[in-house]
């Protein structure tokens, strides 16, 4: 069953509006892809309007982490999901969305991409790991 992203049927005052027509196929949405951490990378291909393809990342294993000081980007494994400010529920379940803080071997990194929309985890280093 799809999600409807059509017109609202409620006025700003809270009153109900009468529908002028039924639902349309082009107003259809989909439930969000909640990317989680796992052992093997899982992608889902979705056909979009216009015939394009959207890659949705279901399970993430590694991330492309950029260091703003050096300008270098390295692909490293994700150790854990530290915090997700998008939702308390996402934080508890360890869902990776844009803005989530992940722990990598390089240190803590903030996710800058939308893994459920474009199929890759890109992140920027927040705090480098302590050197011993």
Image (cartoon, rainbow, N blue to C red):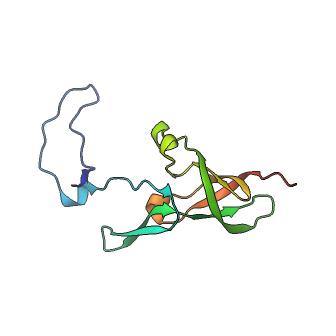
The residue under the point 50% across, 41% down is 92
Name the outermost residue toward the right.
132
The residue under the point 13% across, 41% down is 19
Name the outermost residue toward the front.
39
The residue under the point 88% across, 54% down is 132
Displayed quadrant of residue 53: bottom left
Residue 8 left/right relative to 68 = left
Would you place residue 51 above or below residue 123 in this image?
below
Can you give x and y, in whole percent of width and height, for residue 115 in the image?
49, 60
Using the image as rendered, state which of residue 65 and residue 82 is in the foreground.
Answer: 82
Using the image as rendered, state which of residue 86 and residue 104 is in the foreground.
Answer: 104
Can you give x and y, in whole percent of width and height, for residue 116 in the image?
45, 59
Residue 27 left/right relative to 52 = left
Displayed quadrant of residue 2: bottom left
Would you place residue 31 above or below residue 14 in this image?
below
Q: Quadrant of the N terminus?
A: bottom left
Can you give x and y, in whole percent of width and height, for residue 119 in the image?
48, 66
Would you place residue 50 above or below residue 20 in this image?
below
The residue under the point 32% across, 53% down is 31
Can you give x and y, in whole percent of width and height, for residue 110 in the image?
63, 51
């Amino acid at each position: 069953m799809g999600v409807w992203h059509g017109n609202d049927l409620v006025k700003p005052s809270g009153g109900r509006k009468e529908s002028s027509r039924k639902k349309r196929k082009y107003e259809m949405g989909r439930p969000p892809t909640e990317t989680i951490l796992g052992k093997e990378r899982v992608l889902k291909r979705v056909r979009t309007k216009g015939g394009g393809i959207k890659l949705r990342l279901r399970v993430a294993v590694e991330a492309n982490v950029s260091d703003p000081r050096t300008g270098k980007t390295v692909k490293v494994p994700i150790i854990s999901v530290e915090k997700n400010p998008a939702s308390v529920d996402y934080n508890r379940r360890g869902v990776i969305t844009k803005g989530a803080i992940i722990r990598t071997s390089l240190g803590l990194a903030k996710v800058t991409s939308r893994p459920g929309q474009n199929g890759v985890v890109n992140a920027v280093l927040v705090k480098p790991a302590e050197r011993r």
